[in-house]
Amino acid sequence: MPWLRWADQSAVRPLLSVTWRADSSTGCTRWRVSARSPDVAIAVTNLSKVFRRERGEETHVALQNLDMTVREGEFFCLLGPSGCGKTTLLNLIAGFEQPSGGKLEVFGKAVSGPSPERGVVFQTELALFSWLTVEENVEFGLKVRHVPAPERREAVQRNLELVGLTAYRRRFPHELSGGMKQRVQIARVLANDPNVLLLDEPFAALDAQTRRNMQRELEAIWARTGKTAVFITHDIGESVTLGDRVGVMTRGPASRIKRIVEVDMPRPRGGAMTERFLELYNLLSAEIEAESTVG
Amino acid sequence: MTAWRIGGYSALVCGTLVLWQVVHLIAGANLVSGPADVLARAVELAESGKLQENLAISAARLAIGWVIGCTLAVPLGLAMAQIPIVRRAVEPYLHFFRFIPPIAFVSLALIWFGIGEMSKIVLIIYTTSFTVTIATLSGALSVRREAVWAAKSLGASATQIPFVVIVPATLPSIITGVRLAMGTAFKTIIGAEMIGAKSGLGFMIWDARGFLDFETIFVGIVALAVMGLFADWLLRTALRPVSIRYGIAV
């Protein structure tokens, strides 16, 4: 969701649009600048997800009474102890799985299945297509949607540049480092120009230094593209570094979001240890700790 | 590098021949024919055209049966992995017949499909399709759901998924399957030719037994190995572009 974009270019209305027309009586160009308030990007109400075991009556309640609102253009982090159902929530938003109850809307439309409007970056690099080169992976979404070749080439070029992988375009995923593979995933999703980015612990498997670099780059990419992002993590520092808001989930089963913390720090943040960072870190840390000692 | 490899292979071949000669000298010509005698017999058989004729007919049976078997088995394996009802219907048969070696069916095949080429080719199809079906099925079942989800969320439709994800992701398993099937097809064709044919390498080997013609048996055995090596080399060469793409060793 761009902050500024020419009015006629995007399917989704820009937040700030500039239109113009030639005034024949005066011979001048008349400009009009209009702004609107951000929409709600993702609205989750009273959501629940129950898994049934293959045999027998046994069930597992993963999510219950979950409410969440993500604003347009926002970077929303979902923080929670492992096994709390973060990935389940993301899979529901992505449309991979169907909710057992409640309402789930993205830009006013009920989610009925996966859609290129919602791009997903997976934790596992196995989500990449190992038989395709870097550029073929990035091109994949455009190709299956029958986007014409010149447009595809342009989008591949632009997004490879964005993630800094132009030199590796003809490599295969197995020839890349862990960080590079996640960049391919990001570029592959951005090539589709989705409304929403869903990221499921994309940097969890990376070493600390690479993770910091990737966080910095993701922040820059997000700022440049202005997409709405939902980012799952169990890393408190990561959530404070990246999020506009951090939603803390309760321990499973029957998880919900128990608290939302506003991260009021200027951008770009780049993960610097400011006083405010530490305050927020400790606050979230206490919230998470409370969850892991329950029961 | 290449010079080293050629040298290495030559040394290996020479070593084997020397070992063979030693065993021949210890055991005696009545038990183990010497390499020189076998070579002489091979030349003799080649001059009469018998060797080429039998080799060609075995190779043709193998190639036809193997290609048909693979062509049937790959779609079957993929369908089993994708459509639960197909899997439930086919899998019991698969596991029942899997343990029955094709040799057990030779007599029946001769009655059902005649003494001509059909019976041998059917047996090759039979033996090939089990290996390839099981390899394809297990490969297709282990396709990561994240890869399928990724494709869906990138815009691939339900009808595109098999072609853009399932088949390409299963290809390494299919390659392993067809290579293994080539080996089982060799075993089958020799057995079938020994019992139910009047031509082919298997027949040649079996027929020589009656005359205590050990040299011809050895010629047949070596010819089989050479044919197998050649078939595998051909397959590997044909699959080289695929193997590079997948980063797998074949």
Image: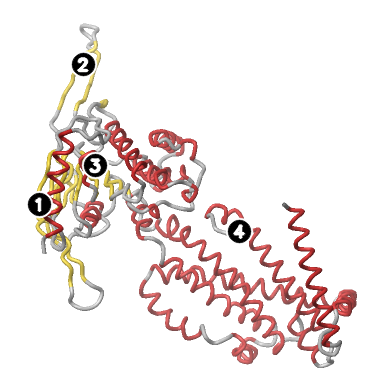
Q: Which label's residue is closer to the chain start, 3 or 1? A: 3
Q: Are marks 4 and 3 on the same chain?
A: no
CA gap, disc 4 and disc 2: 62 Å
Discs 4/2, front: 4
Question: Which corner quadrant of the image does residue B29 belong to?
Answer: bottom right
Query: Label 2 neighbourhood size at 10 Å, few (<14), some (14-19), many (20+)?
Result: few
User: Residue A214 location, x and y as percent?
Assistant: 34, 40
Q: Which tag is nearer the camera, tag 2 or tag 1? A: 1
Q: Is residue B135 above or below residue B1?
A: below
The three-letter amino acid code for the residue at tag 4 is Leu
Q: Earlier in the sequence, mark 2 or mark 1?
A: 2
Provide the secondary structure element on which disc 2 rests. Answer: strand
Q: Quadrant of the N terminus of chain A?
A: top left
| Residue B43 or residue B89, whichever sits in front | B43
Circle on res. B239: 4
Query: Mark 1 highlights which residue?
Result: A258
Callout 4 touching callout 2 (CB < 8 Å)? no
Residue A31, labelled with which disc? 2
Q: What chain does badge 1 belong to?
A: A
